[in-house]
Image: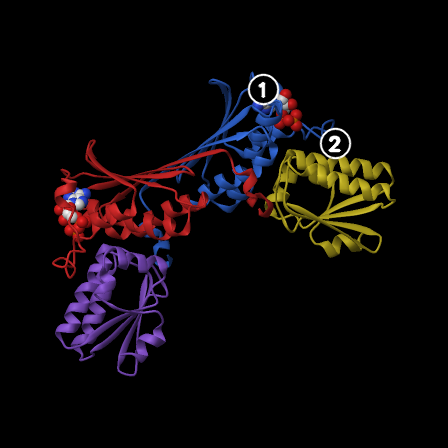
Chain colours: A purple, B yellow, C red, D blue
Amino acid sequence: MSFAIKKQGDIVVVDVEGQLIVGNRQELKQRVLDELEKGERKFLIDFSQTGYIDSSGLGVLVSLSKKIREQGGELRLANLNDDLKTLFELTKLDTLFQISDTRERALETF
Amino acid sequence: MSFAIKKQGDIVVVDVEGQLIVGNRQELKQRVLDELEKGERKFLIDFSQTGYIDSSGLGVLVSLSKKIREQGGELRLANLNDDLKTLFELTKLDTLFQISDTRERALETF
Amino acid sequence: MGASNSPSFFPDRVHIALEIEIPSDVRYIERVVEIVAMQCAQFAYPARQRCLNIPVALSEALSNAILRGNGERVGARVQVKVDVTRERLILEVLDEGLGFDFEDCLTDPTEPGNLEREDGRGLFLMTQLMDRIERFSNQGNVVRMTLTRND
Amino acid sequence: MGASNSPSFFPDRVHIALEIEIPSDVRYIERVVEIVAMQCAQFAYPARQRCLNIPVALSEALSNAILRGNGERVGARVQVKVDVTRERLILEVLDEGLGFDFEDCLTDPTEPGNLEREDGRGLFLMTQLMDRIERFSNQGNVVRMTLTRND
Ligand SMILES: Nc1ncnc2c1ncn2[C@@H]1O[C@H](COP(=O)(O)OP(=O)(O)O)[C@@H](O)[C@H]1O
Ligand SMILES: Nc1ncnc2c1ncn2[C@@H]1O[C@H](COP(=O)(O)OP(=O)(O)O)[C@@H](O)[C@H]1O
């Protein structure tokens, strides 16, 4: 698993490649928090390259979303495949996050 | 597994794709014998696309070689990978067959 | 090995049993999941089960065994037993802990008060993604999950 | 699942046991070999063993079980038991026949008088390609072959 972070305008875009699970979630958390500390406020996590996500991966997303909101920022998610959509629906996290079908849509509507 | 048979000059070239084993060896035997009956005398079997060969596959090659020789013809083999070469060495069948490294070499030297 | 993919010659009965042992280190989880997913691929389990139900439920059971059961004590082992046929998958995850009461520990993360919690979704996901969960003790704490193939 | 390929997180102990049952029909051989080869690939057995020793020796044992042991009687079953670890592979092929005397049936196909025979290379190849061959009876005729990983 690896993360690719880049900026697109004033939006920080994170690609999660592979699994987002207990063994690597801290890495994602830290990198996003670093950006938040630097003053970034708009975050998009793109899951088009993601395999599966476990409960601690979901937990990190919840906690990042909260921290970003506390700073007046926003976290959006994009490109969940059908399996990941189901995971978010099962846990009702689809009601907590702004989820866009495509990266473009997510970037446009920030 | 499948066989591709084509003529190159007066040589019948057979490509064995996949395994040559007890379940399909009769098919190879029959098709080569059909060509022999039609009057063909020069045969080249190319193993570049072949997986493994079992003892009954080897048996068919031995028996075809004999039948072709009886009609004054010749059977050559080409493109054995290292594993297949070892198989022919273990059974000493490398002493019975004309084996060429490449198809071109085999075609030239007929 | 092209022609062999013809489903008509798939054996009548294939039964695969795996035993895997890992140290209490979460970095092993991904590889264990991969090994198990590969076995289910052999039987051509539906993509949904191979890519969602099995990996997520197994990851949860493994991380609970490593973090909760064995408290991440390096020397403590986690054993995984997998038993697969075309019809169903049984996963057993064994840790060296004292066990726990499944019903007591299971919470509903979809309740409004829990939705923004960071933890507490593991057992819930296991119950949602598997057809049956059992917990018992057998020289350690065992969580057994059964999934019936659904296509 | 890229990063997981890091060998450092391969479990300390993985033990795979398979049981496969097929009718007495040689067209099943290729698929059975494929399933077993896949298991050995999981442990990254050397290519030579995966592509030569295992497929050929197993094919021989299977065709003997189907053609000799069971005389191709459609109703008769062949069972294959596979037990793999990183260190060694054990293959057992069971048929419903009366068994045979391995030493008596084994001939040397490399002797000049045998070289042009069509048959009689099966048991010889099994002995050449496997480290150990045993034959015994256990509710049927069993041929057990052991191969030690060699890299
Ligand atoms: N293998 C285990 N050994 C001991 N306790 C466990 C085990 N698995 C789960 N538990 C208990 O169940 C609780 C709920 O687990 P879970 O739903 O996965 O959420 P989380 O692990 O995020 O707290 C854990 O906090 C722990 O107390
Ligand atoms: N499973 C078996 N049951 C009964 N007889 C067997 C079995 N396997 C091998 N044999 C005997 O051993 C002989 C030699 O086998 P093999 O070396 O494979 O050559 P082939 O099968 O070509 O004759 C067979 O002809 C058969 O008589």
Q: CA separation, marks 1 and 2?
A: 22 Å
Question: Subunit of mark 1?
Answer: D
The quarter of the rendered structure image containing the N terminus of chain D is bottom left
Q: Local crowd at mark 2 within 10 Å, few (<14), some, or many (≥20)?
A: some
Q: Give the residue type at disc 2.
A: Glu
Query: Residue at image x 29%, y 48%?
Result: C129
Q: Local crowd at mark 1 within 10 Å, few (<14), some, or many (≥20)?
A: few
Query: Residue at image x 34%, y 76%?
Result: A105
Q: Is residue C5 above or below residue A106?
A: above
How many marks overall? 2
Q: Is residue D15 visible?
A: yes
Nearer-the-camera pick, C48 or D72: C48
Q: Give the residue type at disc 1.
A: Glu
- Mark 1 and mark 2 lie on one chain; the one further toward the N terminus is 1
Which residue position holds label 1? D103
Which residue position holds label 2? D116
Residue A85 x, y percent position in the rendering:
31, 60
The quarter of the rendered structure image containing the C terminus of chain D is top left
Nearer-the-camera pick, D4 or D117: D4
